Image: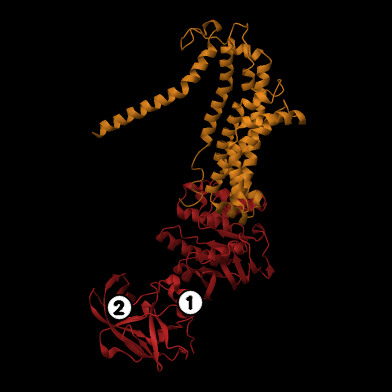
Amino acid sequence: MAKIELSNVTKQFPDGTVAVSATSFVINDGEFFILVGPSGCGKSTLLHMIVGLEEVSSGEIRLDGKIINHLDPKDRNMAMVFQSYALYPHMNVRQNIAFPLVMAKVPKEEINKRVEETAAVLELSHLLDSKPRNLSGGQRQRVAMGRAIVRNPQAFLLDEPLSNLDARLRNQMRTELARLQRRLGTTTIYVTHDQTEAMTLGDQVAVLNKGVVQQIGTPYELYRQPGNLFVAGFVGSPAMNFFPVQIREGRLFFFLLDLEINYPESIALPSQHDHAIAGIRPEDFDVLFNESEQNQKQAAFNTQVDVVEWLGAEVLIYFQIKINQWPDMPALTRDLNLDKKSGDKLQVTAKLDTSHTFKEGDRIKLTFDMDKLHLFDPKTGKRLTSK
Amino acid sequence: MMMRNDLMGRIFWGMGNLIVMAYALLPVLWIVSLSLKQSSHLNDQRFFPQTISFENYRIIFSDMQFPAALWNSIGIAVISTLLAVTLGMFAAYAIVRLEFPGRRLILAGALATAMFPSVVIIGPIFNMWRTVGLFDTWLGLILPYMTFALPLAIWILSAFFREMPWDLDKAARVDGATPLQAFIWVIVPLAAPAVFTAAILVFIFAWNDFLFAISLTSTNNARTVPAVIAFFTGSSRFELPTGLIAAASVVITVPVMIIVLIFQRLIVAGLTSGAVKG
C-alpha cells in the first residue's frame, strides 16, 4: 500500500540530453496509474527512477511521504515487470517466482506456500518445473507477473508488459491484468505507448512527450477535454482530425471545407489571434441524407468518399481535401505528422454507423456537432479554455 | 536429380571431414604409436607398432622428475586458470556494465598486452624473479601465465556479457538482490558457457607453455612437463629419448583432449534462450 509522489523530478544524462524534465504528480494508494507517450518520450526513464534503477538528477520522489531518491532498488519493495519479462533462464518457473523471497530470506516453507498460491492465482501450477524457454509468450508474461506479486510489494511497476504478445493474447491479458490489480488493490504504475491500453486500464493517465508531462487526468478527461494539440492527436483511435480555421467577427471559417459557423458558446476565443486549430474526432461526424434533419447545433459540408473501411459495427470513411493554405503548427505536434504544405492533400477520417452503405466516389453530406468541436491555440497548441 | 545432388553433397562433406580429421589426428596417432614401440623398433618405418610395449611409460613414471613435473603442471595451470577467469569475470562485467572513464582504454590495453611477444619480457622477469625470490616457484609461473591469459579471458567474457540482456541484472536488483548477489545468482550461472570457453583456452595456454617454464625454473620445485621433456636423455649417449618424449607427450596431451571434450558439452550455446522474447 503506497502513495507515490513526484515533485519536479528531472533526469539529465551525462551527455546533456534531458529525458524527463520537472515532472510532478501524485499516485494515490491503490491507483492504476498509466504513463503513456510515443517511444523515447521518457516514460521508461521515469519508471526506472521510481524503482531506483536510474538516479534522479533533481527533484524528489516520495513513498508514503518519505523521500526515497537515494534508496537502493532492493530496499524500495517495489516489483517490476519488464517488457522483455527478464525471466532468469537458468531457473525454472518455481525458482523464478521464488527469487524475490529467497533474496528477502523468507523461510523455505513460507516460500513454497506463497509460490504455490501465486502460481494458482496465475494458473501456472502445472508449469512450476518448466524452464522459461519452454513457455509461450503469454505464460512467460504470467511468470513475470508472478515474480512481481509473490512478495506483496508496495507498488507494481509495469514497463510495456503486453507489447511482446500477439493482438488476441494482448487483449486477454489486459483484462486479466485489470482484474488482478483490482483484486490486489496494489498501487500500479504502467508504462505503455499504446493509447488503447492507457485508456482502458488507467484510473489516471499521464501523457508524456519529449520528457514533459502534457496532461494528467482520467481517460474520460483526456478524451473529452484534451489539454493541448498533442494529447488531442495522441488519444483516440482513429486520431482526431485537425483543420486550421480563421476567426472572423465571432465566427469560425473552415476555409478548407468552405464552411463558416458561429463558434460554440462553450469556447472562449482569445482576442489576440485571428486563426486557431479546430479538432473533430472521427466519431463526432455524422452523415446527413435529408437537409431538413439538420439541427441548429450542427454544421454541414459536402465531400466525396475516397476510401471506405468496413469494420463490422462501424464504418470508416476517408476523404481528402486539397490544401491551399496551412499554418505553422506548434512545436509540440512535431511527432504527430501535422505539418503540411500547400498543395498537399489533407486526409480526413469519419467513423459512421453502418445503417447506410457507402462506396468510393459517393458524394455525401457530413455534419458535426459544434459542441463537440475542440479548439486549440495556433501558437502554443493549448486548448482554448471552456467557459 | 535431387537424389544425385544429395549423394554428391554427402560424398563431398564426408571426404572433407576425413581429410581434416586425418590432418589433425595423424600426428597424434604417430606420437601414440611411437610411445608404444620398443626402443629397438623406433626406426622401423612402420605406422603401427609390431609389438605393443608400455616400457616408455614405465620409465618416465619411475624417474622422479616426471611425476613431480606433472604435479607442477596440473597445479600451476589450474591455479592460473582459476585466477585468470575469476579476475577476468569481474573485470569484464565492470567494463560492460559500469560507466567509468577509460573503459575502452582498458580493453585496448588488455589486447595490447596480449600482443606483446613474451620472449621480450622473459629476460627482465628472470632477473626480477631472482631478486624477489620468485624464481623456480609456482607463483613465479602463475603470475606471468595469469597476466598473459587475463586479456583473453576479459575479451571472451566481455563479448559474452555484452550480449546478455541488461534487464536480467535490473530485474534481480528490483527483486531485492545487491549488485554482488545479482552477479552471483543471475549473471555467473548464465555466463557458464563463456567461463568454460575462457577457462579451457587459459588452461591450454598455461599447460602448453614452454618459454616461461624453461626460463623461470631450475629444479623439480616448479618445472612443468613441457620443460622436463627437454631434459630427457636416452639410456646411453648413443640413444635418442624419442620413445620417452612420445610417451610424455601422450600423457600430457590426452588429459587435455578429454577435458575439452567433456567441457564442450557444457559450452551449450542458447543457454540464454528464453530469457527474453525470442
The residue carrying mark 2 is A322
Q: Please state the chain letter of the residue tagged with numbered disc 1 in the rendered image.
A: A
Question: Local crowd at mark 1 within 10 Å, few (<14), some, or many (≥20)?
Answer: many
Question: Dot 1: what SS?
Answer: helix
Residue B187: tell me if it is visible. Answer: yes
Residue under the image location 62 percent in, 46 percent down: B106
Image point 50% across, 20% down: which residue? Answer: B28
Query: Among all residues in the image, which is located at the extreme bottom?
Result: A249
User: Identity of the amino acid at label 1?
Assistant: Leu
Q: Where is residue A328 drawn, in percent x and y?
A: 42, 78
Q: Which of marks 1 and 2 is in front?
A: 2
Tell me where residue B124 sits by quadrant.
Answer: top right
Left or right position of B36 against A251: right
Q: State the image quarter where residue A25 is shown.
A: bottom right
Q: Which residue is drawn at 64% across and 40% down?
A: B86
x and y percent of residue A171 in the render? 43, 63
**Residue A282, numbered circle:** none
Q: Chain B is drawn in which colour?
A: orange
Vertical comparison of B196 with A185: above or below: above
Above/below status of A327 relative to B21: below
Q: Can marks 1 and 2 be said to lie on one chain?
A: yes
Please state the horizontal and vertical placement of residue A202, each as a whole percent of the image: 51, 70
Q: Chain A is drawn in which colour?
A: red
Q: Position of residue B154 (x, y in %)?
A: 59, 41
Q: Residue A222 carries which label?
A: 1
* Mark 2 chain: A
**Left/right of residue B82 with respect to residue A220 in the rendered view:** right
